[in-house]
Image (cartoon, grey):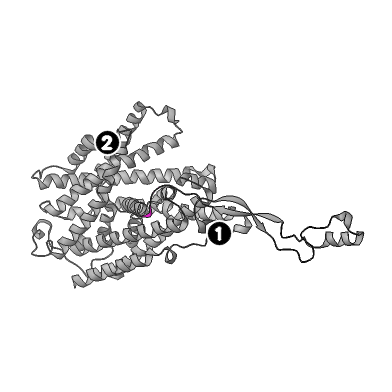
Amino acid sequence: MTKTIIGLMFSLAIIVLLQCVDPSTCFELPTPRDTRRGGAVTTKRVAAPRRMSSTYSAQRLEPADLSPMEHQQQQQAPPEFSVTEYTAVEKPTATSGGSATISDEVLNLVKTIVGAGILSFPAAVGKCGNHPSILFPVSILMVGVGVAAGYMYSLIGRVCCYKQASSFQEAWSKTMGQKTRILPTFSVLALSFITILAYSMVLGDTTQMLLRSVGLVSVHRTTALLGVTATTLLPLCMLKDLSSLTPFSFVGLMGTLYTILGMGIRLFTKSYATGGKFAADVGATTFGSIGSKGLWSLSTLPLICTITSGYVAHFTAPKFYKELKNNTMERFNKVVTRSFAISAVASLASTWLGFLTFGAGSLGLVLNNYSAKDSLMSLSRLAIAISLGSGYPLCFSGVRDGILDIANVREKDRTNGLLNKITVGILSFVTFFAVLVKDFGLVMALSGATFGNAVMFVFPSLMFRKAVKQMDAPNKRL
């Protein structure tokens, strides 16, 4: 039965991927002639001949050569032109964009979307039901949210194309106005803050489990979190040049994929089933009778919010559009569809493998369900810890810069001393909440329910609607 369910899961994932490869089947939107060519909208005046007159020769007669009656008839007649007369028309041209290929963009966008957040999905499902049959409607829900998220990501690219915007805030300012720019700025800042809070929580949990795997079983989670913050996170966040950390971001994607692979191996080998190798360490997994009917409850709302948080990356859309080589909308949509399809497959795999292994007993961070004696999953924890540790200062700098932007602190006033003080203050504040809050799944649901939904669905819709209204009447379709 388990093999059949897993087979159906991967079949569904493959179908989703194949359906999303062609952008015309997923995210094709009505576009003007300019965005069919792609790129940022600019105009070039070119000469286009009008139809040749059937009344006049190659040169029109001057009024002096006409009788008064003929002159009046010419004035009343619709203007006609000779074959040598031209009129100027508007024709869009496209900018070339950056230097990144489609493959580069897909890899980087998947790396941005897929993270530790997908490890909270099994617990969110477990709060709705405790029977494997619930996974089928949940999969449909996850794919639906992924399609909607990709659609909105593409909308932002179209707004940037038409308005020649290079950032999320700039796209908002050019459509909704400068006065309300604080809304997307604060939302992205809050979303980044919740992200580093989640990072700190995961690092505290994984560090504790890693120490237990080497025999230090008495180390408390708070001690582990404070230790990794003081020895690793603080020095990294103090760095002013983060370019040296960029290569490590690829480790994050590999760590997530390795984790999914390890989860699959442990499921198929039944290591955590009754009588399994590690069952005694975590307790036997039991399933109940609540299946798809469990979705008809209020518990579905946290599930939807958690799923939403797994696709949030929309404030990066302008950056990816700008850096894409030959950034036509057709090419950008290929990046979007492939990236979100791969992300959906990774989310489905994590959800199915985690829930089928631990059922409704899945913890907010499913890695915490695995035994500290499990060397395979200990390597996964190490990979995730390295990934989050290297990505932490990149996200942290966004929070710090966002606070300074809202406070209207000029670039020349952002001295090293000021940056260091703010870094210590923010990191202390984040660590304090990471010690108090232990439910990783709750944080992800909160992220998706609030600022995640705003950045993913509300803001793109408002910007696109406003951009359409601002267009000239002949080009009313964006």
Q: What kind of element bears circle 1? A: helix
Q: Which amino acid does label 1 sit on?
A: Arg
Helix, strand or loop for the magenta stretch, by majority: loop
**Residue nearest the observer in this picture, 358 or 66:** 66
In the picture, measured across the screen, residue 205 lies left or right of residue 57, that is: left
Q: What residue type is labelled 2?
A: Leu
Which percent across, then down, holds residue 159? 50, 52
Which quadrant: the N terminus?
bottom left
Toward the front, the furthest residue is: 58
In the picture, measured across the screen, residue 163 lies left or right of residue 323, that is: right
Could you tell me which residue is drawn at 22 percent across and 48 percent down?
384
Toward the right, the furthest residue is: 68
Could you tell me which residue is drawn at 8 percent across and 64 percent down?
275
**Residue nearest the observer in this picture, 16 or 97:** 97
Q: Mark 1 or mark 2: which comes first in sequence? A: 1
In the picture, measured across the screen, residue 151 lies left or right of residue 377, that is: right
Splitting the image into 4 quarters, where does residue 247 fall?
Answer: top left
Q: Is residue 100 in the magenta section? A: yes
Which percent across, then down, holds residue 228? 21, 39
User: Is the residue marked by circle 1 packed among few (<14), some (14-19), or many (20+) residues within 10 Å?
Assistant: some
Q: Do the residues labelled 1 and 2 touch (CB within 8 Å)?
A: no
Q: What stretch is highlighted in magenta?
A: 98-102
Which quadrant: the C terminus?
bottom right
Which label lies toward us, 1 or 2?
A: 1
Splitting the image into 4 quarters, where does residue 62 fall?
Answer: bottom right
Q: Which residue is denoted by mark 2 in the rendering?
A: 236
- Asked if residue 126 shows in the view, the reply is no
Q: Which residue is denoted by mark 1 in the rendering?
A: 33
**Vertical comparison of 185 with 161: above or below:** above
Which percent across, then down, holds residue 12? 30, 69
